[in-house]
Image (spheres, rainbow, N blue to C red):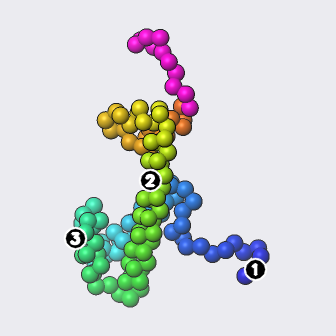
Amino acid sequence: MDALQPAARPAAVADSPLQAGAAARQAKNGLQHLALNQGVQKKRRLWSKAGQQVLRELPLAPWASRRREDLLKVMVLLDQQIESLDAAVKEAAEKDANARLLMSQPGVGPVTSLAFVLTMETFPVFSGVSR
């Protein structure tokens, strides 16, 4: 391997949560297009267990079948990456007192609370309700 060439790595490996989410979205779009080309229109139901079974059983040309298998493998890899990132965010949010306080509010989860805490750094104390 040439010293100037970067080491090859799978396209599914993401450097950040945003890249992982974008890659997962691209893989889902590719699978959705394969299904649509075969006349299967399930929208979000394509990602249920029954929808996944329909997707796996679609009769496809050899190149499309290979593409389907590649995209399904990418989805598994990205799901694992996203799960580990979610676990890390949840752990970090549970360690922070302000994030725990924010998570006590309905609809505020670890991602939102930790993002808010990291953005605000400190919470200002107001002298009254009107401020």
What is the C-alpha distance between the residues marked 1 and 3? 47 Å
Q: Which residues are magenta?
A: 121-131
Identify the main secondary structure in magenta.
loop
Nearest the viewer among 18 and 108 is 108
Instruction: Identify the amino acid type marked 2.
Output: Asp
Look at 55% across and 56% down and name the residue there.
Answer: 16
Q: Residue furthest bottom?
A: 62
Label ID, residue 50: 3
- Residue 73 occupies quadrant: bottom left
On the image, the x and y values in percent for residue 108 come to 37, 38
Nearest the viewer among 11 and 116 is 116
Q: Is residue 5 visible to the viewer in this orientation of the structure?
A: yes
What is the C-alpha distance between the residues marked 2 and 1? 37 Å
On the image, the x and y values in percent for residue 35 come to 30, 73
Instruction: Identify the amino acid type marked 3.
Output: Ala
Look at 38% across and 66% down and name the residue there.
Answer: 28
- What secondary structure is found at the residue carrying circle 1? loop
First in sequence: mark 2 vs mark 3: 3
Nearest the viewer among 24 and 114 is 114
On the image, the x and y values in percent for residue 32 come to 34, 69
- What secondary structure is found at the residue carrying circle 2? helix
Task: For label 1, count other residues whose C-alpha is less than 10 Å away and answer few (under 14), some (14-19) or many (20+).
Answer: few
User: Closer to us: mark 2 or mark 1?
Assistant: 2
**Is 101 placed above or below 64 here?**
above
Q: Quadrant of the N terminus?
A: bottom right
Instruction: Identify the amino acid type marked 1.
Output: Asp
First in sequence: mark 1 vs mark 3: 1
Q: Which residue is mark 1?
A: 2
